[in-house]
Amino acid sequence: MSHGARVIRTGVSSGGPAAPPALTVASSSAGSDAELMDGAYFRSCAGMLKVAQMISLLIGFISVNNSSWTDYSAYSFFQIVTMCDLVMILFFYITHIFRVYRKLNCVSWPLAEFLHYLIGTILLLIGSIVAATRSYNVTGLVAGAAAEKDLFEWGSKRTVLRGARNSLFFVAES
């Protein structure tokens, strides 16, 4: 059942050989694929936020580790969570700097970051609350746990919202 003639357009005319396509150069803020590193990511908001999160995690870890009250298992949990989050944020930071996400298409990177920040925020929230309640009057522990939770939650809320938006677009495209 045909509803009319279809027109298929090609680049070749029936009169002779096809002309070579015109070369166009598109400028990109991320740079070309031939470059090894993405220099624009260092100065981007997401890149600076990842660095701030890594510094915050390191400060929280050092303040709890150098305290004299690190005998509790709550502080061990807090230290493990901060170091695991630090390593994962560093992994995603290196992934973006070296553009690994372009070569590994089998992984949904926005969804992976979304899940990392969601789980990391929940674990850091639990660890910060437990560490802050166990610290009594030791100001270094309270400050390290509270500042860590606040800065990480602020950064991860922004990233989680962006990751949720990107993963919804990814699901819609699939």
Image (tube, rainbow, N blue to C red):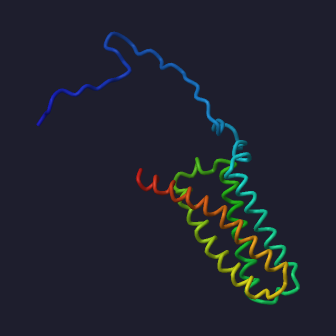
Residue at 79% x, 63% y is: 55
64 is higher (above) or lower (below) than 18: below
Give the residue furthest to the top.
Answer: 15
Query: Where residue 105 sits in the image (x, y, percent)?
Result: 53, 51
Tally the numbered discs.
0
67 with respect to 103 (left or right)? right
Question: Going 68% across and 50% down the picture, which residue do you hit?
Answer: 45
Q: Quadrant location of residue 73?
A: bottom right
Q: Nearer the viewer, residue 71 or 147?
A: 147
| Left or right, residue 101 beside residue 166 | right
Residue drawn at x 34%, y 15% as measured from the top left: 13
- Res 121 → quadrant: bottom right
Q: Quadrant of the N terminus?
A: top left
Q: Which residue is found at the position 68% from the left and 64% from the top?
A: 88
On the image, the x and y values in percent for residue 144 come to 79, 74
Q: Position of residue 6 (x, y in %)?
A: 22, 28
In front of the other: 81 or 124: 124
Question: Which image quarter: residue 74?
Answer: bottom right
Depicted 39 relative to depicted 48: above or below: above
- In the image: residue 48, left or right of residue 29: right
From what the image shows, is residue 101 above or below residue 154?
Answer: above
x and y, in percent, of residue 124 in the image: 67, 75
Is residue 109 or residue 148 the one in the foreground? 148
